[in-house]
């Protein structure tokens, strides 16, 4: 039986807590330890994803004689242990997180090399990753809350790590505060479900659920709390504040943690409640949040002057696409014909957009970090002419900017096309908004491109040169993946995305994988 | 009726916490409000775990009666620890902000905006 | 690997390989047209300097159009929208929390009304 699910958590946790010890020995050893454990985690994640794709859902019961023994013999048919349930959707999220972890850690080795307190930095980075991996693979609601808090604490501490005259602390404080509030209300909602069904296991609750008024309160609290954590309008105000003040490699990881919250919304909506609740209303609530996020996010991005703040508003806008895609899937979940006609494609588009978004948005933030690393400013009114000296960075920026704007043949186009065409059948109005938003995205990245890289070589940036190799490797990996995903979208959709979408829809399959054939 | 009182207390405490967060401008007071909501959540969880006539799951010379699964108690303990960590982190941020900005009023902690 | 495989999106399809072939053909045509143009351009001579009707070239910093100037017309045209939207981003933590609780109540109302 597969042990990689446990290793996925164990390696980053051991790595995190051993990091200060290795830091005592020496800087080189600490960096090697960080790279080594990062590679081990990514390897465990990739093997786990491979196993899930070939063998189907993997269950790992912590502390059991046999990890696949979900229900102890004397428990009366109730799973009482903490379970990891890794189906195709979780595997997809693990893959996304692993890629971003690889790129961001390599990038950090260079970008943080001049800074102090790196022991704590890497320890928190690995804790953040452990939180993300736990969130996307757990099958237990309270366990999810614990990983959510690990993730939030580590994320907030990292966001505030470089104090920057207090501005970074402000961003970290806002992130910590909203994460704690959303976590607490999530916990209260979990308590409401436990009070009714006497269990914390998602699959068990799903198998006995009887949708009452209290469950309704719980579902609203869970969805709104997680929507705030993933940065959807109108609870997005922390996103630009935190993303713009955090170190760039951390922003790339905070994006993954917002994706993990997004995953949780859909795990709860599809697998936990499914058709027992009114999917049309909840689906429309998610679609409305999505449309607002798309439009307000991009229109706030246009007049921004700080490059990272501009990109942060774009991440709000891109989250809108995923919310719309999966929200449409949720809204038509009860109608088999509409689901087959466009619902599944909309969901596939939304899920495909998750990995595409993580890739190009992570790359964009790493590029912004590279520019700040060399020029020391993020203000678009001061930058200019960097295309003469930072040619590789400019190339990566072109790739990422075209991908986020949905220009063929990059990956953003493929997933956006799936969303447009399926949502057009559902409601043409939403599809038109999505396309307008895409155009405005292109417009604002033309602005960034022009003011950062174009123009004559400015005298104050005469000495600027290309960023060091590990940063380029981290960015290059993401750029290559963007191109590959753009060139072979059918391959990605068929092997990764379609199983994930079907796993979300197949609620009884999720229940059966834990509860056995009941 | 008597068993409903803890739930009423939960709503009351959570309400006080929410009002503190929304109305108080002082960061320390907002963090206190957060801690109050956390207390409400803990009380809620512990109340859920009470079962009429059940006994504590301690096997040493226990009478052969129905035992209560101590899940929520474990959850509460975990949440207390997590709450301790978050409160400590937030207070650390508050100290740092006071040092850099010279104020802990939320009116003044808004250099990042627009 | 099947290079003719296409991404089927329900009502349409998308094949990046065909697109790239089309792009390459267009690129080659454009390159041929460009090549048949003026060939007297030489690097390192007077030709590479900006020509400003005989005036002296201003400072590099004065030439570059800054990011803040772009889309001025757009934001000016939509002033009514932006003057309402931008002040919402107050940066005040109390307001952030107010939005959260407001949305909880609004979503709850929606879900109860359309139960």
Image (cartoon, rainbow, N blue to C red):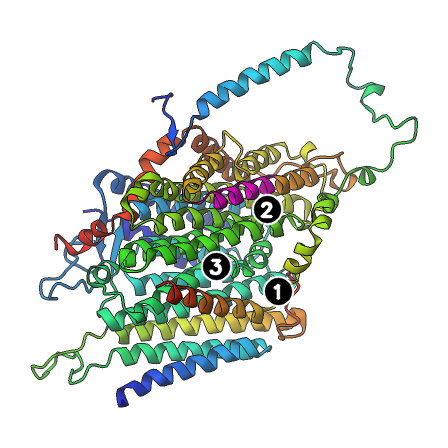
Q: Is residue A37 above or below residue A496?
A: below
Q: Position of residue A255 (x, y in %)?
A: 48, 51
The tag earlier along the polypeptide, 3 or 2, is 3
Q: Is residue A434 visible?
A: yes
3 vs 1, front mark: 1
- In the structure shown, which secondary structural element does the residue marked by tag 1 occupy? loop
Q: CA distance from mark 2 to mark 1?
A: 23 Å
Q: Are marks 2 and 1 in contact (CB under 8 Å)?
A: no
Out of B13 and A364, give the one closest to the viewer.
B13
Residue B93 included in the magenta stretch of the image: no
* Letter of the chain that mark 3 sits on in the rendering: A
Out of B42 and A331, give the one closest to the viewer.
A331
Task: Kindly give the residue lying farthest to the bottom in the view shown.
Answer: B2
Residue A330 shown left or right of residue C49 in the figure: left
Q: Residues within 10 Å of mark 2 (few under 14, many from 20)?
A: many
Q: CA distance from mark 3 to mark 2?
A: 17 Å
* Segment tinted magenta in the rendering: A427-442
Q: Position of residue C20 (x, y in %)?
A: 50, 22
- In the structure shown, which secondary structural element does the residue marked by tag 2 occupy? helix
Q: Position of residue A30 (x, y in %)?
A: 46, 51
Q: Which residue is mark 1?
A: C91
Q: Which residue is mark 2?
A: A369
* Letter of the chain that mark 2 sits on in the rendering: A
- In the structure shown, which secondary structural element does the residue marked by tag 3 occupy? helix
């Amino acid at each position: 039986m597969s042990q990689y699910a446990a290793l996925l958590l164990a390696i980053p946790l051991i790595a995190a807590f051993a990091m200060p010890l290795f830091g005592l020995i020496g800087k080189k050893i600490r960096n090697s330890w960080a790279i080594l454990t990062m590679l081990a985690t990514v390897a465990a994640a990739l093997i786990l994803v491979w196993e899930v794709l070939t063998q189907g859902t993997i269950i790992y019961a912590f502390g059991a004689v046999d990890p696949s023994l979900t229900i102890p013999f004397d428990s009366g048919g109730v799973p009482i242990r903490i379970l990891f349930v890794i189906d195709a959707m979780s595997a997809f999220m693990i893959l996304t997180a692993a890629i971003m972890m690889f790129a961001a850690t390599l990038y950090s080795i260079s970008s943080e090399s001049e800074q102090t307190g790196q022991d704590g930095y890497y320890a928190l980075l690995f804790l953040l990753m452990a939180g993300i991996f736990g969130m996307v693979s757990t099958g237990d609601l309270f366990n999810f809350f614990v990983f959510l808090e690990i993730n939030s604490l580590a994320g907030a501490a990292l966001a505030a790590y470089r104090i920057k005259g207090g501005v970074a602390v402000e961003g970290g404080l806002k992130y910590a505060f909203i994460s704690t509030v959303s976590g607490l209300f999530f916990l209260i909602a979990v308590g409401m479900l436990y009070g009714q069904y006497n269990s914390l296991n998602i699959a068990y609750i799903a198998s006995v659920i009887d949708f009452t008024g209290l469950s309704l309160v719980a579902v609203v609290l869970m969805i709104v709390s997680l929507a705030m954590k993933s940065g959807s309008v109108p609870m997005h105000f922390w996103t630009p504040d935190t993303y713009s003040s955090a170190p760039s490699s951390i922003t790339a990881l905070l994006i993954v943690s917002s994706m993990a919250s997004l995953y949780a919304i859909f795990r709860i909506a599809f697998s936990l409640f499914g058709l027992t609740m009114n999917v049309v209303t909840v689906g429309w609530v998610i679609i409305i949040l999505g449309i607002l996020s798309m439009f307000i996010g991009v229109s706030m991005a246009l007049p921004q002057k700080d490059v990272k703040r501009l990109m942060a508003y774009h991440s709000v806008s891109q989250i809108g696409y995923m919310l719309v895609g999966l929200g449409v899937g949720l809204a038509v979940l009860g109608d088999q014909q509409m689901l087959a006609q466009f619902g599944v494609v909309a969901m596939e588009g939304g899920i495909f957009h998750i990995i595409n978004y993580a890739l190009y948005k992570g790359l964009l933030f790493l590029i912004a970090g590279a520019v700040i690393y060399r020029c020391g400013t993020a203000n678009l009114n001061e930058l200019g002419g960097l295309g003469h000296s930072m040619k590789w960075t400019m190339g990566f920026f072109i790739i990422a900017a075209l991908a986020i704007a949905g220009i063929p043949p990059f990956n953003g186009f493929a997933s956006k096309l799936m969303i447009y065409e399926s949502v057009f059948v559902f409601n043409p109005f939403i599809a038109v908004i999505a396309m307008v938003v895409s155009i405005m995205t292109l417009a604002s990245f033309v602005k960034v491109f022009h003011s950062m890289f174009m123009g004559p070589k400015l005298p104050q940036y005469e000495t600027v040169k290309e960023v060091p190799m590990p940063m380029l490797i981290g960015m290059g990996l993401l750029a290559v993946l963007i191109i590959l995903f753009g060139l072979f979208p059918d391959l990605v959709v068929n092997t990764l995305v379609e199983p994930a979408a079907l796993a979300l829809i197949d609620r009884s399959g999720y229940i059966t994988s834990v509860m056995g054939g009941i | 009726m008597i068993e409903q009182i803890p739930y009423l207390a939960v709503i009351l405490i959570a309400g006080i916490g929410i009002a503190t967060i929304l109305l108080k401008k002082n960061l320390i007071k907002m963090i206190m409000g957060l801690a109050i909501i956390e207390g409400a959540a803990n009380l809620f969880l512990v109340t859920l775990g009470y079962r009429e006539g059940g006994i504590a799951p301690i096997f040493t010379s226990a009478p052969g009666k129905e035992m209560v699964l101590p899940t929520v108690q474990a959850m509460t303990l975990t949440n207390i620890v997590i709450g301790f960590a978050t409160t400590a982190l937030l207070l650390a941020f508050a100290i740092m902000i006071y040092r850099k900005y010279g104020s802990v009023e939320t009116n003044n902690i808004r250099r990042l905006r627009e | 690997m099947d290079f003719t495989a296409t991404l089927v999106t329900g009502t349409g399809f998308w094949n990046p390989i065909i697109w790239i072939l089309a792009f390459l053909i267009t690129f080659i045509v454009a390159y041929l047209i460009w090549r048949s143009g003026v060939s007297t351009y030489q690097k390192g001579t007077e030709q590479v300097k900006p020509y400003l009707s005989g005036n002296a070239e201003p400072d590099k910093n004065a030439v570059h159009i800054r990011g803040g100037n772009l889309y001025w017309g757009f934001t000016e045209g939509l002033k009514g929208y932006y003057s309402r939207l931008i002040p919402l981003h107050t940066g005040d933590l109390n307001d952030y929390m107010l939005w959260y609780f407001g949305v909880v109540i609004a979503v709850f109302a929606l879900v109860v009304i359309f139960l």
